[in-house]
Image (cartoon, rainbow, N blue to C red):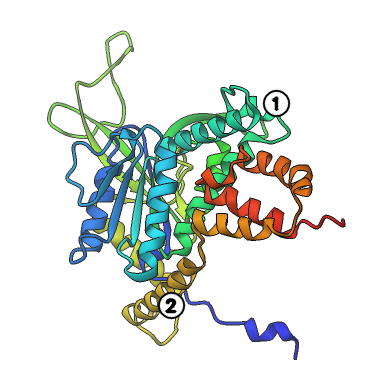
Amino acid sequence: MAGFRKNVRTNIPKVDLQSYKTIIASGYKGGKTRLYKELTELHYPNDPQADLHIAFEPGEKSWHLRNTIALYEEEKPWEYFKNEIVKGLVEEAKTNPVTKLIGIDTVDRCIDSCTDYIIEKASKKYGKKFTSLQDVTQSTNENGYILLQNELSQQFDILTKLGIGFVYICWTKEKEVTTIDGVKYNTLELMMSATGKKVFESQADLICCLHTEVKVTNKDGEIIEENEKTKKGKDIASNFHTTEVKMYFRPSNYISVAGGRFTNLPEKVDYSAENFFKVFKDAVEGQIGKVGKSLEEIKIEEVAIRDEKAREYAEEVFSAEDLIAKINEQKTRFTNEQLTQFIVPEFKKILGTTAYPTVTDVNALAEAVKFITEFNVSN
């Protein structure tokens, strides 16, 4: 029998919200942060530290959130996120994992913060003041958009491997689209750039779009389908209407940013955390089929396996100090002349400086370790 057969297994869909990446999207002040707050309080009623709200913008000020970090108050939000929060969560995962679900509020501002970091890093590396990712791309041999995508992916991949789930809070925008036949229509989609969509939208398991529906009424509160008209046939606007927020889980004739990796999803339901979890539960049950186990039994097994993998991964993640020590160890293989000729110039490119012991960027140091470990002077 072929060797790969030992890896063939039956996959049982995950049933815990923590195992998924969820997008909650809407326009400005559309109820995104409120829904996140109510979802986490409902999902973790007896575990008040389970959720961590990371605010890249001040949209949380009017809400009582159990655990929030105001990153927008930091001078360099992305550096604080990767050097303090990500590393801190890795350390916690080794012994006493606390955080189970993270809310990124908003992803749009998160991408902006990471973009600033990439531009500043490139400016230091090349000794030139860049103003945009396009500027980096046009002025160097590197693609600024790929640098951004890689940086975002690296940090969120670390947290995903720690077994942490995500609620990505995003903005929407209306966009005019032209069909292949030349017909134009307006649709609601994510505001973020194509680079951001590759990291967040493409990896999302469930996308919920909040949209306010308007119903026009007369003074008696009755819904009207057609405008009243003057004697000359001119439309008269009503002075009365009602609004109601809906949660869309499938695309509509106007909303394109909705859907997920589930088949059993309604088009829309009324806005509430309770309704969200009913949709989620029904969707998961629809995917499971007949496995001879209850949702709770599957969840217990799922959590145990996830926590074990997270601990193993956390032990493998190196700190900056560990990586610097590995570079020091590898340096002994080279003469000073070889270091100057082959290693130092490449370190300058990778790290932006030759003073590698001062670098705190774990990803860059890991790349430097890989280079010096694999480099052979004889080649």
Q: Position of residue 246 (x, y in %)?
A: 30, 45
Which residue is at 41% across, 87% downward?
292
Q: Which residue is mark 2?
A: 305
Is the residue 343 above or below the residue 88 in the image? Answer: above
Residue farthest top in this picture: 232
Q: Position of residue 101 (x, y in %)?
A: 34, 58
Q: Position of residue 332 (x, y in %)?
A: 69, 58
Between 219 and 137, which is closer to the camera in this rendering?
A: 137
Any mark on residue 152, and which?
A: none
Do we see residue 40 in this rendering? yes
Q: Residues within 10 Å of mark 1 (few under 14, many from 20)?
A: few
Any mark on residue 138, and which?
A: 1
Compute the Cα span from label 1 to label 2.
46 Å
Do we see residue 188 in this rendering? no
The quarter in which the N terminus is drawn is: bottom right
Q: Tag 1, which secondary structure? A: helix
State which quadrant residue 324 falls in: bottom right
Which residue is at 49% across, 60% downward?
261
Q: Position of residue 55 (x, y in %)?
A: 32, 41
Which residue is at 77% across, 56% downward?
375
Question: Which sits earlier in the primary sequence, circle 1 or circle 2?
Answer: 1
Q: Nearer the viewer, mark 1 or mark 2?
A: 1
